[in-house]
Every structure is written in structure tokens, then in C-alpha cells.
Image (tube, grey):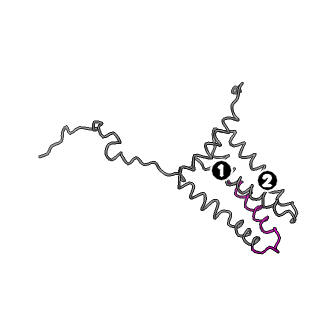
Amino acid sequence: MTEVDIEPRHWQTLGTELKKRTFMPARHPSFVIFFFVAIAGIGPLGIWTELTTFTLETSKGIGGVRSAFVSFVPAFLAATCMQLVWAEDYRRSLRAFSIFVFFLCAIGIRLCYVIPDGYKKSVLSIGFCLVILSMWMWWIANAYQKEFMDEIRDFDNPIGGSNLDAPLAGSLNGFNAD
């Protein structure tokens, strides 16, 4: 059995990792564009459709929007949290955090489902908080996915690098111009 830290800094490490995963992908246009088009735009299309129907037809109840929240959040969040649990080898606290967020969202979905129709603002508030939380979990779960990141290209490589005064590699020994 391994030793246990006497003065663990695991909460600080978890906070640092979450902060890094939250802000680092924003520097990659491909990641951000994919997120807004696929994850925030097309992914919750059922929510956007039901929300549009709800706002245009004021006599209709909130049942459609509630159903959209109740179906989207658990499916999307479960996939995202499982991705983080399976992909994360060394940060046990990040896996635990993922499971904790899923548990909180399960409670939130249950609340969203049992709140009476008269409390439309509560259903909408809880539902949107859950959607935002599930999308943030996708963001941090995919923060290191190189498929979503822009490549850093060194355009100076063909000319030998950015230092033009550096000696050139190689030699012309054995080169015959005849």
C-alpha cells in the first residue's frame, strides 16, 4: 500500500486543473467554434425547439420544455462524465468530481420534473443551469482533445528557423558539380 500525504493539496490541484481546462481551450478557435455549433447549437436542438414553441404559444404548458431538459441533460452529461472517468488516468479527483456533478444534475433533473407547472420560471432556471453545467463538463472533458485544437505551425522551419544568423546544418562535402 502506498503512503498517504500528510499535508494533501488535492483540493488545490483539482481547482487548478478545472481552471486550466476551463480557460485553455478558449485560445483555440476550432475548439470554440465546434463547441458553439455542435454542442451548444445542434446538440440541444430539442430544447431550442420546445423553448421556441413555449414562447410563441403562451397558452401551452411547460411540459415540452421540461421533457426536453429531462431527456437532454442526463444523456449528454452521462456520456460526458463517462468520457472523463474513462479518459482520466492520473487525476482521481477529476473523476470523482465528474461523478459528483452527474449526481447533482440527477437531483436537479428530478427537481425539474416534479416542480408543478405553475412555477415555470423555476423549471426554466433549473433546466438552463443544468444545461450550462453539462456543457461546461463537456468543455473540461475535451479540453485536451487534440482533434479539437488548432495546430501550432512553425512557418520559419523551411528557412532554418527564426534565427537567420545561425550556421546551416550539413555540409557540401562529397558534392560534385560536374
Distance from disc 1 to disc 2, alpha carbons, whole Å, reads: 17 Å
Q: In this view, does 99 lie to the left or right of 168?
A: right
Q: Which residue lies at the image location 53% right of the left edge and 55% below the top edge?
A: 30
For discs 1 and 2, the disc positioned in front in the rendered view: 2
Where residue 112 sits, quadrant-wise, is bottom right
- Residue 62: in magenta span: yes
Q: In this view, does 4 lie to the left or right of 166?
A: right
Q: What stretch is highlighted in magenta?
A: 56-79
Q: Which of 113 and 84 is in front in this view?
A: 113
Quadrant that contains the N terminus: top right
Residue 77, percent across and down? 71, 54
Label 1 amino acid? Gln
Per the image, the residue denoted by label 2 is: 106
What label sits on residue 163 in the rendered view? none
Q: Nearer the viewer, residue 53 or 99?
A: 53
Q: Which residue lies at the image location 70% right of the left edge and 57% below the top edge?
A: 76
Q: Which residue lies at the image location 35% right of the left edge and 45% below the top edge?
A: 157
Residue 97, percent across and down? 72, 43
Disc 1 crowd rating (10 Å Cα; few below 14, some 14-19, many 20+) is: some
Per the image, the residue denoted by label 1 is: 83
SS for callout 2: helix
Which of the marked residues, 1 or 2, is nearer the chain's N terminus? 1
Going by the picture, which residue comes out furthest to the left? 178
Q: Is residue 81 above or below residue 123?
A: above
Residue 65, percent across and down? 77, 66
Q: Nearer the viewer, residue 23 or 85?
A: 23
The secondary structure that dominates the magenta segment is helix
Q: Nearer the viewer, residue 41 or 4?
A: 41
SS for callout 1: helix
